[in-house]
């Protein structure tokens, strides 16, 4: 049977119960995947008046979307200079503007009225593991002057005033960037989508897809669904129905932990109130729940239980902030993201009525939000800006070989970052010692040049002659001397 969109059942606490698709259904848009991207598409399309059905094989936000630190800032995983080199300045500028719109989409939704307890706070600080002042100035000029982004350059002293560690040098502060409770945001997004009229069916995996014809057909274990448009937002978990598409992504599992309460000392050592991430993409942390550290660091190309990485997270915190001592990790979590070979997300139309929104590994919450806006507007308003992503084609990620290579590249990248950081700190200490040596030498020279000369040991100083004797022993001045005076 077919069923139109009606209300969604709720339990006594007011939360939506999980609903499986157990009846045949027609919709304008079918979104596969209830993560950040899929829910953003559903929300935006429902707000435009479309009938939307979301199919999720497990439950809302079960993977990376519900297990992330909640940092929202402009930009992509691909460095800006590389983006310009790849597609040119004008298109790079347009994409950067879209990334800022995605961040504002999150900000507009993440209000206490929409999502109680979302805990939005301002400011993100990106710190460098090496002393790269020249590159910092160049990047600041590009972001501020060419890409209309509010940024501040922080010198080493200012960075270390808020982060008590010698591991970090210069920094870029994004005052308009922010962070939210990531777990609450993804569930809040689902609530907003339902309120707008979207139907979300959990525990409903997709068995097969027939994307030929005007009305596409999707088969689930207990029902069939027809839609004019299908959006593939399942990332690496699209599975058998679209194996070739999911194989264009390298699966990367990212793990994080939360410490036990650390007391007031954590605010003395980590005085920055927002999120902190390093320029090498290794560490990402912020204070949560008043005096706990939430820290994301290890990553693998193989699935593992997050609890296994509690020790690695603890060691990483001790490496950066040894003053905190041996912290206790009370909670660990993680999820798999899909990373593309070229470093940009997969956003666009594969064929008429079949869309893709995936590859958000390392991209940030703003990009999944941007994808939701863009695809919904493309389907319902004819927005063609998705074509800006056309140069970033679907590229096979290498299968098992790609995973091994990705793991080795990750290990090499961490080792290279550690070596570069050690060298930078060694050079800094050498410069400090040189300055101290020069200061001591200058002080010794001043003392030798301006102070009274001491006689050699054992020699008594000769007394100065009395004023009268000195006058008598003085030679009379010549006429030339008098004239010259």
Image (cartoon, rainbow, N blue to C red):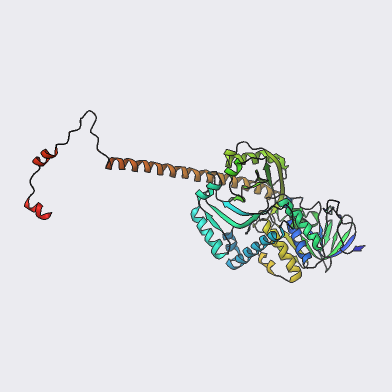
**Residue at image x 64%, y 38%?**
327
Q: Is residue 433 left or right of residue 353?
A: left
Vertical relation: 213 (above or below) 433: below
Across and down, in percent, residue 89 comes to 58, 66
Q: How many marks?
A: 0
Q: Residue furthest top?
A: 458
Q: In the depicted view, which residue is nearer to us: 152 or 232?
A: 152
The image quarter containing residue 473 is: top left
Residue 167 appears anywhere in the view: yes
Q: Residue furthest bottom?
A: 382
Q: In the depicted view, which residue is nearer to us: 439 or 214?
A: 439
Q: Is residue 482 left or right of residue 99?
A: left
Q: In the depicted view, which residue is nearer to us: 228 or 453?
A: 453
Q: Residue furthest right?
A: 1
Across and down, in percent, residue 314 comes to 64, 39
Across and down, in percent, residue 43 comes to 77, 62
**Residue at image x 73%, y 42%?**
305
**Residue at image x 50%, y 57%?**
137
Looking at the figure, which quarter contains the N terminus? bottom right
Residue 394 appears anywhere in the view: no
Q: Is residue 140 left or right of residue 337?
A: left
Q: In the depicted view, which residue is nearer to us: 331 or 385?
A: 331
Vertical relation: 149 (above or below) 68: below
Across and down, in percent, residue 35 comes to 75, 55
Looking at the figure, which quarter contains the C terminus? bottom left
């Amino acid at each position: 049977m077919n069923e139109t969109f009606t209300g969604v059942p709720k339990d006594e606490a007011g939360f939506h119960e999980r609903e499986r698709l157990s009846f045949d259904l027609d919709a304008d848009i079918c979104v596969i995947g209830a993560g950040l991207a899929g829910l953003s598409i559903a929300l935006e399309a429902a707000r435009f008046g479309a009938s939307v059905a979301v199919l999720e094989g497990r439950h809302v936000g079960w993977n990376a979307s519900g297990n992330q630190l909640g940092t929202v800032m402009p930009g992509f995983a691909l460095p800006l200079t590389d983006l310009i080199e790849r597609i040119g300045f004008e298109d790079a500028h347009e994409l950067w503007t879209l990334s800022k719109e995605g961040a504002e989409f999150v900000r507009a939704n993440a209000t206490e009225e929409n999502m109680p307890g979302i805990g939005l706070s301002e400011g993100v600080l990106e710190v460098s593991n090496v002393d790269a002042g020249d590159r910092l100035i160049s990047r600041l000029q590009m972001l501020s002057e060419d890409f209309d982004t509010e940024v501040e350059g922080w010198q080493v002293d200012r960075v270390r005033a808020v982060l008590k560690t010698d591991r970090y040098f210069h920094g870029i502060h994004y005052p308009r960037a922010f962070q939210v409770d990531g777990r609450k945001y993804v569930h809040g997004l689902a609530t907003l989508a339902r309120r707008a009229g979207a139907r979300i069916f959990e525990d409903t995996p997709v068995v097969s897809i027939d994307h030929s014809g005007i009305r596409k057909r999707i088969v689930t274990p207990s029902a069939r669904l027809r839609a004019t448009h299908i959006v593939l937002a399942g990332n690496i978990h699209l599975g058998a129905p679209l194996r070739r598409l999911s194989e264009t992504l390298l699966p990367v599992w990212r793990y994080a932990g939360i410490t036990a309460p650390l007391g007031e000392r954590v605010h003395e050592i980590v005085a920055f109130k927002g999120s902190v991430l390093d320029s090498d993409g290794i560490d990402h942390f912020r204070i949560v729940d008043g005096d706990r550290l939430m820290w994301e660091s290890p990553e693998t190309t193989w699935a593992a239980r997050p609890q296994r990485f509690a020790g690695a997270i603890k060691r990483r915190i001790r490496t950066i902030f040894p003053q905190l001592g041996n912290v206790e990790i009370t909670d660990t979590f993680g999820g798999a993201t899909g990373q593309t070979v070229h470093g940009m997300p997969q956003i666009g139309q594969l064929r008429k009525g079949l869309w893709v929104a995936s590859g958000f590994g390392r991209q940030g919450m703003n990009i999944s939000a941007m994808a939701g806006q863009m695809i919904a507007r493309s389907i319902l308003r004819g927005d063609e800006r998705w074509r800006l992503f056309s140069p970033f084609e679907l590229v096979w990620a290498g299968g098992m070989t790609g995973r091994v290579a990705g793991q080795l590249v990750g290990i090499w990248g961490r080792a290279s970052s550690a070596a570069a950081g050690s060298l930078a700190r060694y050079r800094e200490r050498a410069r400090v010692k040189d300055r101290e040596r020069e200061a001591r030498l200058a002080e010794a020279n001043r003392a030798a040049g301006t102070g009274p000369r001491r006689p050699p040991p054992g020699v008594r100083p000769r007394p100065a002659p009395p004023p009268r004797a000195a006058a008598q022993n003085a030679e009379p001045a010549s006429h030339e001397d008098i004239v010259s005076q």
